[in-house]
């Protein structure tokens, strides 16, 4: 990073790697998103499906990983360990028993990515059985089985000793026009570049 932009590298000095590097993200939440506006990110990822009924949207998302899996080639090391080669020279190590991939996306999201799906197919296993428990209906129902306790109105609130209460933010509005588009991830930039190359090839 320093070789590309020294100032950008310095900006990260006071920030722990767990806040900006996938290699240090926690695998507990099963979410690899680094942005707060997750709705906008999700909406951008399903451009081809967002106008369809909800069931068709879900099926479309499910097919996306499955469609890319045939592009990956798996090489068996033992019953659990596999080496996976993908287009553009990428290579990953997948462990079925631990449900991990060296790209870290399987353990971060809890959903097998194309690398893992290719391995599971080779091992004659159903990828759907290797999706995290956080996505199953039983877990969803447990999240909502409790009740939200009733709350009194403001007139019944007691006094506290916290002082003045919440204060306005210290951050002011940045100079210039606010950006309307969010910053794209490296994967989105790569996908856009690949699409452009394909269009140029077709025109040529």
Image (cartoon, rainbow, N blue to C red):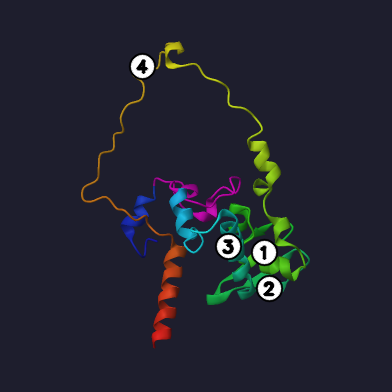
Residue at horizontal 57 percent and vertical 47 percent from the top = 26
Instruction: Compute the Cα span from label 3 to label 4.
Output: 52 Å
Q: Earlier in the sequence, mark 1 or mark 2?
A: 2
Q: Earlier in the sequence, mark 1 or mark 4?
A: 1
Could you say whether the residue bearing mark 2 is in a helix, strand or loop? strand
Instruction: Reply yes or no: does residue 25 show up in magenta.
Output: yes
- Do tag 1 and tag 2 residues touch (Cβ < 8 Å)? yes
Which residue corresponds to mark 3?
60
Which residue corresponds to mark 2?
74
Which one is in front in this view, the residue at disc 1 or the one at disc 4? 4
Q: Position of residue 106 (x, y in %)?
A: 62, 57
Q: Earlier in the sequence, mark 2 or mark 3?
A: 3
Which residue corresponds to mark 1?
94
**If the image is split into quadrants, where does the C terminus sit?**
bottom left
Q: Is residue 77 visible in the rendered structure shown here?
A: no
Could you say whether the residue bearing mark 4 is in a helix, strand or loop? loop
Instruction: Compute the Cα span from label 1 to label 3.
Output: 25 Å
Disc 2 residue crowd, few under 14, some 14–19, many 20+, Cα 10 Å: many
Could you say whether the residue bearing mark 3 is in a helix, strand or loop? helix
Q: Position of residue 201 (x, y in %)?
A: 42, 84
Which of the pair 125/104 is nearer the observer?
Answer: 125
Given the current orientation, which residue lies at the most extreme left position? 176
Instruction: Compute the Cα span from label 2 to label 3.
Output: 25 Å
């Amino acid at each position: 990073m320093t070789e590309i932009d020294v100032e950008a590298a310095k900006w990260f000095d006071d920030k722990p790697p767990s806040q900006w590097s996938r290699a240090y993200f926690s695998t507990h939440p099963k979410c690899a998103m680094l942005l707060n506006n997750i709705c906008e990110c999700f909406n951008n990822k399903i451009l081809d499906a967002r106008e369809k009924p909800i069931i068709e949207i879900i099926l479309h998302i499910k097919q996306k990983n499955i469609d890319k899996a045939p592009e990956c080639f798996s090489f068996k090391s033992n019953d659990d360990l596999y080496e996976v080669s993908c287009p553009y020279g990428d290579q990953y190590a997948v462990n079925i028993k631990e449900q991990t991939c060296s790209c870290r996306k399987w353990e971060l999201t809890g959903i097998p990515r194309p690398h893992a799906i290719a391995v599971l197919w080779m091992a004659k296993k159903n990828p759907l059985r290797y999706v995290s428990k956080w996505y199953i209906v039983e877990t969803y129902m447990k999240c909502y089985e409790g009740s939200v306790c009733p709350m009194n109105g403001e007139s019944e609130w007691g006094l506290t000793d916290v002082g003045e209460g919440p204060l306005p933010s210290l951050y002011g509005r940045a100079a210039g026009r606010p950006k309307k588009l969010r910053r794209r991830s490296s994967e989105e930039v790569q996908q856009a570049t690949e699409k452009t190359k394909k269009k140029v090839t077709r025109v040529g």
